[in-house]
Image (spheres, rainbow, N blue to C red):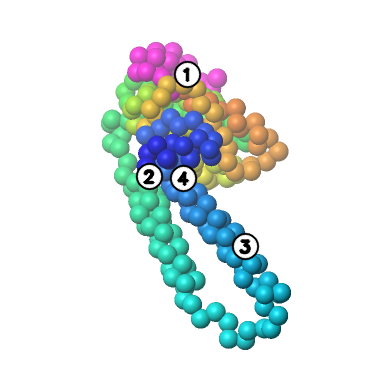
Amino acid sequence: MEKLNKFVGGILQLPELASEHGKDVDILIIYIHYLMIVLFVGWIAYFAYALFRFYHKRNPKADYVGVKSHASSYIEVAVAVVEGFILLGLAIPLWAKAVDVFPPEKDSTVIQIVAQQFAWNVRYPGKDGMFGKQDMRWVKDNNIFGVDPNDPAGKDDVQNLNEMHVVVNKPVIVYISSKDVIHSFKVIAMRVTQDAIPGMRIPLHFIPTMEGRYQINCAQLCGNGHSSMAGGLLVVENQAAFDKWLASKSGPAASFE
């Protein structure tokens, strides 16, 4: 079955996969296509049968009794059962795992993202591993995250623009919000998508499994410069490279770049 799934995935030309849970997402997509293929072939076959069976020269006189067989009802029940399996056996468990079962923050790379027209603001805790306190009253053009300037825990926090770094094979927890309108954080290779909504901080998580550089897209039309938000970049690297990058951004002079 796995070989068949890979074969079908190749036909569908699914994009590069670089996250642990992404395999389950791809399997769900493939199973839905299996069902669509069966329904497509079945309906085409039935259409061809109807054309042949009820051709006017073969049936010059109308039959007012009609079909007495219950085959169509059985087929409808079978399709409903398959759809129920995909929904209850695959889709809902995958959704529940994505929204309910989060890894411990102490074992994860924790990041805050605030979307805006038309960029991604990224924030990491500094060497102390703690984010500085935040409050809406502190939000300004030069303080997107509303960090309390009097909180020492926020002095070493790292802020960056349009580029986020994570460690390969280590859980990532991202808290997403928006400064202005609704955006949608999407990394196709990680199989993650989450709306960024003003006034809300919504978490998502994933485990990257392959080093590389992956595009961050906005999956929600957010204005005339919407396309420019595809300039965001997710860098997956080893722990040493991540530590070196974070150290280069840390310190009291840390700012958007």
Disc nearest the viewer among 1 and 3? 3
Residue type, mark 4 in image: Ile
Residue type, mark 2 in image: Ala
Real-space Cα distance between discs 4 and 2? 19 Å
Q: Which mark is residue 151?
A: none
Q: Does residue 239 belong to the magenta stretch? A: yes
Asked if residue 25 shows in the view, the reply is: no
Q: Does residue 84 belong to the magenta stretch? A: no
Give the residue drawn at x 28%, y 36%. Answer: 104
Which residue carries the number 4 mark? 30
Q: In what quadrant of the picture does the C terminus appear? A: top right
Residue 254 lies, with reference to residue 39, above or below; the image says: above
The magenta segment is 236-257
Q: Which mark is residue 98?
A: 2
SS type, badge 3: helix
Residue type, mark 1 in image: Ala
Real-space Cα distance between discs 1 and 4? 45 Å
Discs 1, 3 touching: Cβ within 8 Å? no
For this rendering, which residue is in front, 173 or 114?
Answer: 173
First reached walking from the N terminus: tag 3 or tag 4: 4
First reached walking from the N terminus: tag 2 or tag 3: 3
Which residue carries the number 3 mark? 48
Which residue carries the number 1 mark? 254
- Left or right of 257 in this view: 156: left
Give the residue drawn at x 67%, y 75%. Answer: 58
